[in-house]
Image: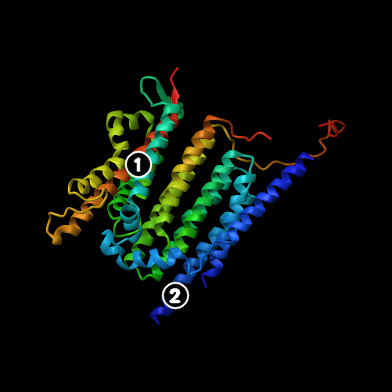
Amino acid sequence: MKKGIIIFAVFLFWLLLVSAMVSLPPMGSPENPAYSHIVPRYLEEGVEEAGAHNIITGIILNYRGYDTMGEVTVILTALMGVLAVLGRENLLHHTSKVDESTIERSVIVKCVVRLLVPFIILFALYIILHGAESPGGGFQGGAILGASVIALTLTFGFSLTVKKLPLKYRTVFESAGPLGFFISGVIGLFCGLNFLTYIIPSVAPAYQDLIRHLLLLIIEIGIGVGGGTIIASVFLAMEKVGKE
Amino acid sequence: MLRSLDVLLLIFLLVTAIGVVCTKDLLGAAIIFSAYSFTMAIVWQQLGAPDLALTEAAVGAGVTTVLFLIAISRTVRREDE
Amino acid sequence: MLDIFINTLVIIFACIGIFFFLVGTLGLIRLPDVYTRLHAGTKCDTLGAGSILFALAIYERFSINGLKMVVLAFLVMVASSTTGHAISRAAYKIGIMPWRKKVLDVFPEEESENVTES
């Protein structure tokens, strides 16, 4: 009896969803409102308006700047949640399984990681800095930066990473994403325009493009460094084990 | 021409997605999930979204798998029946 | 003439890669323990992916994209063989013994009456 009621309720909900779905515009149809108004504008004028040759970066950082700023803040909030549950690591009280294990670390793995990690970091920096021209950007490069820190920690031990990336620097770097948005956005406010406009009206129009590029670059670097450090911090917070 | 590759990728995507849900061994499920992420990255690339492909490959297959593995090593490996 | 030569080379290297992928996958499914499976699985990445990427590099006539393929092949080879080394070393250190061929003795001579119990 109870099961029947549940199945009936689910069926009613399904009917509701299907009836709502029928009224939606057909999926992938070129006459959809999204394709008829926004997409042509982005594709035709995006490069000049947004100031990035990679239109996706232009949309993310310029047209949808507030959205991306929210995302960056969400990532920072996620780090805060992790730290509220697990706590910061502290070399006096914490160690990790890699440091504690009695098995000697393999020389081959150490050597290969030491050779590869500089190239991984170089690739991450390329993706961050070249995000306005080619596929990539702050989020992707930041994830690769964080992955390189994870690889170093898993091979060379927990204490080395915590010593090389001390807490006083990491707390600054973690907030670099919102900070980059703040720095680039507030410049527009000071010039009497809107937040996140990326324009300084008093400068000659010939340099307007350069300034927009620089401001976008500040945001990209902020997102990249912030994302990478946040991933590293989450990893270190999860990796730590209490000392006896 | 490339349609057959897309169909193969989508079939593999379905298989891995069902495999993640159905596997009782959580370590195996995490590894299948990373395979799912790599396939998804190739699908994004096929759909013409290289930015998303990069994100999916770096975050989904790299970082998330490591975090899952740490979480599994802290808790239990088997899912309770 | 040069085109035919290059295409032949590409096909040969791609076939070698596909062969190693096939053999590696079969070995991953069929072999008995960690070490032998690793032996099969690393062949997929080093020889299989390596020769397929090399075939693609030849196909691109070693232009800038082709050189990227060569670098990629080098990275894949180094990373996958290191991973194989790390996993097998860890497996050895935690005490997994390599597989030995066992002779299956279903009816041992002395305790033939205990077989049905165990």
Task: Give the quarter of the figure containing the N terminus of chain C.
Answer: bottom left
Left or right of B76 in this view: C82: left
Q: Which residue is mark 2?
A: C7
Residue A112 in view: no
Secondary structure of the residue carrying tag 2 is helix
Give the vertical position of A149 relative to A36 (above or below).
above
| Residue C20 drawn at (x, y percent) | 53, 59
Mark 1 vs mark 2: tell me if same chain: no
At a point 38% along the width and 30% down the height, the residue shown is A158
Count of numbered marks? 2
Residue at the extreme top of the image, as rendered: A244
In the rendered view, how is the structure colored?
A: rainbow
On residue A78, the disc is none
Counting from the top left corner in percent of width and height, residue A34 is at 44, 63
User: What residue is at 81 percent from the left and 35 percent from the top?
Assistant: C108
Percent across and percent down for residue C9 are 44, 71
Q: Residue at x 43, y 56 (%)?
A: B53
Q: Considering the numbered disc 1 on the image, is that residue within a helix, a strand or a loop?
A: helix
Please state which amino acid type lies under the numbered disc 2: Asn
Q: Residue A228 has which mark? A: 1
